[in-house]
């Protein structure tokens, strides 16, 4: 979220990016919206993000949905003073200061919600002022999820209050108050919507079943010939019968049955066995995409498709420090691609702890070669968000040992963007770091083996 917001700032401030990025921005005018539950604000990453957004002054609008509980744990165990807006009060900027502007509103109060959101988003967009909207008194008609019952941890009074202040009910009252519709009209809309959803649910289920039923029938037709040729004829027949009598077979049962039959005929040679084996492999291949695809990039620009450029040396090459070679390469890259930018601890003013960015900030500006606070998770977050918006960030982690602070977000968020969006989004981020300085344990760690086990 931090990086998505930062991208707006970069697009707004870097004139070299005014063309060619229409897919990602309209002049940097975008606000990054994010939402979080009140209990989840107890996470360290939340605080790191708020602090970073405030220091960086990026258009980030964070809403906290406050229903008073994190599953069953009430907010008095979650948040200082039981209120995230109170706990964050020190972030609220005084005139001339940076900070996160804090708003507070009740979730059932629609006129206030409209007023506050309009104002907060305007401030956020026009001043690149991060804002936090603490939306209190939210209700959960079914508790945290439909698999638990909130009667176990909420008092009868609280449940009664929640019914009265149910946000949908309150929305209905508001609609009547401003005379958009009467209660009868609302009841009609509600009944019609319920009916429509039920019909669509039935249609969707029928469509889903038709496909699985045809796949089960296909499996049966490939297994059946084995009944007459196999030595385990009766067992094979019993397995097929079990699948046929399953009124709602799913792929798991189709594949499991075919595999069990394969195991029964494993030592037999027959065209029927070969046919089943071939079908099973083909079926698994054909349905694989339904469960898992785009684990890796399929783009023609993916790393594996980029041809190697061999280094060329002159007859009498000059000997220089490695950092000079790196700096020269960075300079060429930054010259050629205005969408490239880098940021990290000590990366900006002094050009990195190993000086491989020396002089780069003077040449390319603090927007593209920037210092950050000591906050590896959000350095990585900046990189994820900006790369998703068409920029080419290089996030610098000062030493490999400190990548651990960012490992969770690398594993859960960065590495899964392409997969989670079925190839719809990607985050082409370079993470740059260094280790093995042999200067004490936190600068010399050898962690590549652990990283190689991290997806
Ligand atoms: C990092 C992490 N820790 C724990 C969980 C398990 N978990 C899922 S939802 C939840 C409670 C969240 O409460 P809140 O932030 O108030 O959001 P709400 O569900 O009330 O909207 C917990 C503990 C999780 N999903 N992720």
Image: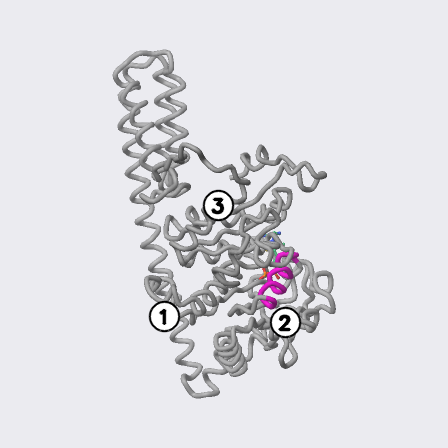
Residue name at image x 42 percent, y 59 percent: 389
Classify mark 2: helix, strand or loop: helix
Q: Position of residue 319 (x, y in %)?
A: 51, 37
Find residue 419 and report its horizontal and vertical position in percent. Answer: 42, 46
Magenta: main secondary structure: helix
- Between label 1 and label 3, give the one nearer the viewer: 3
- Residue occupying image coordinates x 53% and y 63%: 366
- Nearest the camera: 222 or 280? 280
Does the stretch in magenta take in 195? no
Instruction: Determine the residue located farthest toward the front in the rendered image.
Output: 316
On the image, numbered disc 2 is attached to which residue?
Answer: 160
User: Which label was assigned to residue 415?
Assistant: 3
Q: Residues within 10 Å of mark 1 (few under 14, many from 20)?
A: few
**Structural distance between the alpha carbons of marks 1 and 3:** 43 Å
Q: Is residue 249 left or right of residue 399?
A: left
Residue that mark 1 sits on = 192
Image depth: mark 2 or mark 3 in front:
3
**Residue 47 highlighted magenta (yes or no):** yes
Q: Report the residue at 37% width, 52% height from top.
A: 424
Is the C-beta separation of discs 2 and 3 under 8 Å? no
Residue 77: percent from left, percent from top: 73, 61
Q: In the rendered structure, which segment of residues is drawn in magenta?
A: 43-55
Q: Earlier in the sequence, mark 1 or mark 3?
A: 1
């Amino acid at each position: 979220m931090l990086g998505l917001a930062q991208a707006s700032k970069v697009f707004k401030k870097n004139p070299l990016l005014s063309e060619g990025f229409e897919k990602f921005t309209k002049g940097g005018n975008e606000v990054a919206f994010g939402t979080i539950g009140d209990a989840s604000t107890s996470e360290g990453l939340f605080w790191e993000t708020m602090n970073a957004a405030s220091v960086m002054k990026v258009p980030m609008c964070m809403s906290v949905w406050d229903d008073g509980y994190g599953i069953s744990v009430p907010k008095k165990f979650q948040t200082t003073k039981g209120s995230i807006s109170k706990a964050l009060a020190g972030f609220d900027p005084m005139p001339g200061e940076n900070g996160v502007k804090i708003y507070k509103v009740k979730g059932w109060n629609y006129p206030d919600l409209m007023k506050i959101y309009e104002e907060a988003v305007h401030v956020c967009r026009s001043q690149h002022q991060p804002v936090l909207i603490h939306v209190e008194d939210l209700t959960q008609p079914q508790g945290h999820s439909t698999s638990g019952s909130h009667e176990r941890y909420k008092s009868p009074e609280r449940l009664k209050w929640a019914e009265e202040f149910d946000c949908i009910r309150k929305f209905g009252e508001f609609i009547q108050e401003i005379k958009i519709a009467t209660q009868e009209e609302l009841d009609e809309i509600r009944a019609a919507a319920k009916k429509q959803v039920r019909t669509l649910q039935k249609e969707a289920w029928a469509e889903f079943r038709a496909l699985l039923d045809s796949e089960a029938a296909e499996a049966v037709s490939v297994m059946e010939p084995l009944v007459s040729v196999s030595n385990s004829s009766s067992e094979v027949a019993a397995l097929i019968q079990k699948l046929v009598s399953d009124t709602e077979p799913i792929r798991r049962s189709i594949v499991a049955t075919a595999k069990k039959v394969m195991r029964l005929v494993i030592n037999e040679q027959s065209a029927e066995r070969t046919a089943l084996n071939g079908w099973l492999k083909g079926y698994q291949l054909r349905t694989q995409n339904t469960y898992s695809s785009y684990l890796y990039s399929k783009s023609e620009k993916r790393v594996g498709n980029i041809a190697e450029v061999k280094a060329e040396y002159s007859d009498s090459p000059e000997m220089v420090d490695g950092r000079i070679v790196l700096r020269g390469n960075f300079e060429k890259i930054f010259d050629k691609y205005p969408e490239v930018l880098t940021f990290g601890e000590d990366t900006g003013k002094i050009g990195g702890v190993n000086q491989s960015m020396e002089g780069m900030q003077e040449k390319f500006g603090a927007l593209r070669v920037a210092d950050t606070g000591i906050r590896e998770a959000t350095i990585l977050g900046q990189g994820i968000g900006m790369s998703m918006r068409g920029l080419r960030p290089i996030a610098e982690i000062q030493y490999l040992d400190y990548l651990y602070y960012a490992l969770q977000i690398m594993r859960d968020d960065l590495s899964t963007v392409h997969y989670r969006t079925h190839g719809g989004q990607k985050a082409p981020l370079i993470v740059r770091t260094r280790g093995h300085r042999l200067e004490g344990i936190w600068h010399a760690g050898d962690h590549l083996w652990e990283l190689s086990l991290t997806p």
